[in-house]
Amino acid sequence: MGIIDDKKYQDALNELDKFKENAIKEELSRYTEEYKKSEWFRQPVLKDAVGEKLADEYAHFYCAVQGRYSDIKHFVELFDMKAAVFGKSIYDEDLGCVRTGYKLETSVYVRFRNIAAEMIGLEQKSFDEYYEGTGVC
C-alpha cells in the first residue's frame, strides 16, 4: 500500500467520532426521563453503549488512526476476521441449538473494517456478507 494522505486519516477520525457520538446518543435514548433527572444519572460513555471489548477496540483503532499508523491493512484484516467470527451462526452446546451470530459486534466490526478499507482504497463490504441470521435459539 502507498502512503495514506492526511485527508484519509482525518476522514477516518471523523467517521469514528460520528460512530461514538451516535452510539452514545442511542444509549441515552434508552434512559427514562425520570432517571435522567435523578441524582444518580451519569452521562453514558461508549463502554455503556457497546460494551467494554468494543470500546477498547474503538480506542485502539482510534489511537492508531490519530497517530498516523501506516499499516492500516492490519486493521482491515483484523476487523474482517472479527466480523466473520461474530457473524457466524454456531452450535451452542449449553443451549443445545444453533445460535445466530452476534448482530451488534458484527455490525461494529464491519463498520470499523470499512473505515480502515476506505483509508487504503479497498472495497467496502456489507453487513450481510458476514452475518448469518440463521439459528433457532
Image (cartoon, rainbow, N blue to C red):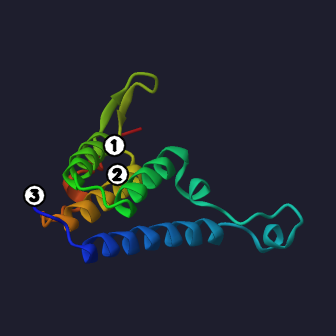
Query: Which residue ends up furthest to the top in the rendered image?
Result: 93
Q: Mark 3 and mark 2 in contact (Cβ < 8 Å)?
A: no
**Kind of residue indicated by mark 3:** Met
Vertical side of 122 occupied by 95: above or below: above
Residue at horizontal 34 percent and vertical 44 percent from the top: 101
Quadrant position of residue 9: bottom left
Neighbour tally class for label 1: few under 14, some 14-19, many 20 plus, Cα within 10 Å: many
x then y, percent, for residue 99? 37, 37
Vertical side of 75 occupied by 127: above or below: below
Secondary structure beneath dot 3 equals loop
Q: Is residue 22 left or right of residue 29?
A: left
- 71 or 81: nearer the eye? 71
Sequence-earlier tag: 2 or 3: 3
**Kind of residue indicated by mark 2:** Thr
Q: Mark 1 and mark 2 in contact (Cβ < 8 Å)?
A: yes
Give the Cα distance between marks 3 and 1: 28 Å
Residue at horizontal 34 percent and vertical 74 percent from the top: 10
Residue at image mark 1 = 86
x then y, percent, for residue 130? 23, 51
**Kind of residue indicated by mark 1:** Phe
Residue at image mark 3 = 1
Neighbour tally class for label 3: few under 14, some 14-19, many 20 plus, Cα within 10 Å: few
Quadrant position of residue 124: bottom left
Residue at horizontal 23 percent and vertical 55 percent from the top: 72
Give the Cα distance between marks 2 and 1: 5 Å
Give the Cα distance between marks 2 and 3: 26 Å
Query: Which dot, 3 or 1, sits closer to the camera?
Result: 3
- 108 or 120: nearer the eye? 120
